[in-house]
Amino acid sequence: MLTPPSAADSLRVFPGLPSDPATHTSPQSSVNANQLSIPHINTIDLGQPTASTQSGAGESAHSSGPGAWFLEDNFDVSALDFSITSTISEWAQIPNVFPVASLSTGEHDVFTPVRSSVQDIEASNMARDTVKRKWFTHMTPSDEHQPNREFAGIGDNWPGQTNANESYRAGLSQKLRRPMEDEVLPSSEQLNLFAKLYFHRFHPLLPVIHAPSFRPTVENSLLFLSICSIGSLFVGSSRAVAQGSRIFERLNKAILASWESFLSESRPDALSMVQAAILGQTYAILAGKPKYLVLADVLHGTVASWAREANRLGALCSQPQDILSSADIDQSWHRWIDSEQRARVQAALNIHDAELAALYHHEPIRSHRLRQFPHLASDELFSAPTASEWEVLLKQSLQNQSKNQLKAQPSLDPFPVTGQDSRFTAYGILEGISARLIDAKKSEEFDHLVCQDTSNLLIRWWQTYHTTGQDPFCLPVLWHSIFISLYADMDLLERAVGRDGRAPALEASEPAREWASSVNASRCLVHASLIARYLERMSISAEPAIHVPRALFSAALVYLCVSQYAPKHVVSAEAFASPEVKLLGEGAAEVAFFPGNTQSNECSVVTDLDQLYGMIDLLQRGGRWGISQAFANVLSTVLDEGKGAYG
């Protein structure tokens, strides 16, 4: 992909933002609190890690409050809007549209619409495959993006001719021109609101940005807009959600148009571009639109390559002791921030890799070596608001790290010795176990030994990282969902309920019926029930982590398939004897809540689908992620089409 030299440069010349973060003081919010009707948001607790890029080396401690995240009063949103539009226009090289028909020189030169009979056949089949049409990854042709006229292939009109004529060339040129939507950005007040909500509500779920040092500048303008696109989801209005969606779509084009320039510039510029892309990927996964989800899957490898190239621009600070040896503690802090953010970018890419592999049932593209997982700082250290507080916490962290290394047995521990006090590390490692399991299943290397090894890893993870304290990542939900993937072929179950249409569902019905009558189905039901119980106890003000909708969908799918293919299935007592259930304690059976069968000492499934409808309700109430609603719609459609499958 070639980018005109001036395209990316236009992103850097708009007025209204300071180009030198070192001289930028903390701006006051221009948002009228009465107009926004959101009291006390300015008192965001920095106890949780928060947002991105580097501030100047000489920045004072008093400018690290939440107000520093905002745009200044003199910020020119129109200039930023124009710069993005110009970048996209130059990249796409959009000329004036000319009438194509004027180029025709004969009856065979006119663009002749070619209608394929295959489309009619597919439309007829799709009318019957309701579940397939409703599936969260299914893309349907959009009339608004279809060209008004199609040019005929040469071979269709002129048998034996292999040369393109002028009309064919003009048609190719026309197809390469993409329509550009010229939408204005929201006002600076709205952008500030979106940014506040991002840091307050979403940032703890994916802490890849260093919030205390983040300042909106010219260099990180794309990152700021990416922050705003996610923050728009928390306003509570459809208008704000639509604005966030438009920001995301334009921002995606701007990043694709300017990535070469960012990677050729300074390391901070390249890092902020990669962070913007990662937040964009996150938005695409959570939005619930099939075209966004496909886009996230397609661009995932590209973003990983950008991150690798950005890190190549300079070596990471590998030894914290070397950072502390510097005389300028403020400069050392910002060097450490740069290094830590890069490590967290790699962790976020691993999380995306595992989630996309689970959603699409394909191999992960990254290597998930658990002992080589990036060494991340503790949550408290990453959220230190000033250089002096950071220095104290870092020294304490180094002392604790030395003690842990003396106690550790590297040959026996499958996880990194460092990072055990970082919940983000625990999150990334657990997603890594999930990715390794998916890779083993897709490569046909999954057997009893791999199953036992994965189970042992999960148990070891629980013993190492589980906590009864506050957990913004909802890691027990992810832990249970991996056990479901271990004991069930989720790809098979999705096909059995109609993901790929009627015929594949009939083919999958017999193996699905065999699984639904097995002990593994009982084990999955136990874990599915424990997922539901965990989420039912969550506070209504808590935001579900990125993986929660997918995990809950897997749990509901297990109930759906068992109720369809083995309605008289009873939960075997052997399922409660599994090592991971014993690890949870004696109360796991009561928490799972299955009616007892005193004669057989087993527990029967609730055949009236109470549990399943409860999970669908949880998905519908599961925060503001569109993907939750998409999952709920799929399950409801399956039930409407015959309570579960075509078998």
Image (cartoon, grey):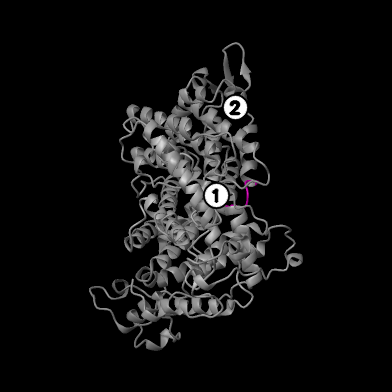
Whether residue 451 appears in magenta in the rendering, the answer is: no
Residue nearer the viewer, 404 or 543: 404
Can residue 114 be spotted in the picture? Answer: no
Residue depicted at x 37% and y 27%: 452
Question: Residue 250: image x %, image y %?
Answer: 51, 70
Residue nearer the viewer, 286 or 410: 410
Question: Residue 209: image x %, image y %?
Answer: 50, 57
Residue depicted at x 75% and y 62%: 37
Question: Residue 379: image x %, image y %?
Answer: 52, 47
267 vs 110: above or below: above
Of labels 2 and 1, the one closer to you? 1
Three-letter amino acid code at the position of disc 2: Ala
Numbered disc 2: secondary structure: helix
Residue 111 image-quadrant placement: bottom left
Range drawn in magenta: 621-626
In this picture, residue 265 sits left or right of residue 388: left
Residue depicted at x 37% and y 53%: 322
Question: Residue 240: image x %, image y %?
Answer: 64, 64
Q: Quadrant of the N terminus?
A: bottom left
How many residues crowd mark 1 within 10 Å: few (<14), some (14–19), many (20+)? many
Direction front: furthest residue = 327
Could you tell me how far apart the alpha carbons at marks 2 and 1 are, in whole angstroms? 26 Å
Direction top: furthest residue = 599
470 vs 307: above or below: above
Q: Earlier in the sequence, mark 2 or mark 1?
A: 1
Whether residue 624 appears in magenta in the rendering, the answer is: yes
Three-letter amino acid code at the position of disc 1: Leu
462 vs 148: above or below: above
Badge count: 2
User: For mark 1, what is the residue?
Assistant: 205
Numbered disc 1: secondary structure: helix
User: For mark 2, what is the residue?
Assistant: 592
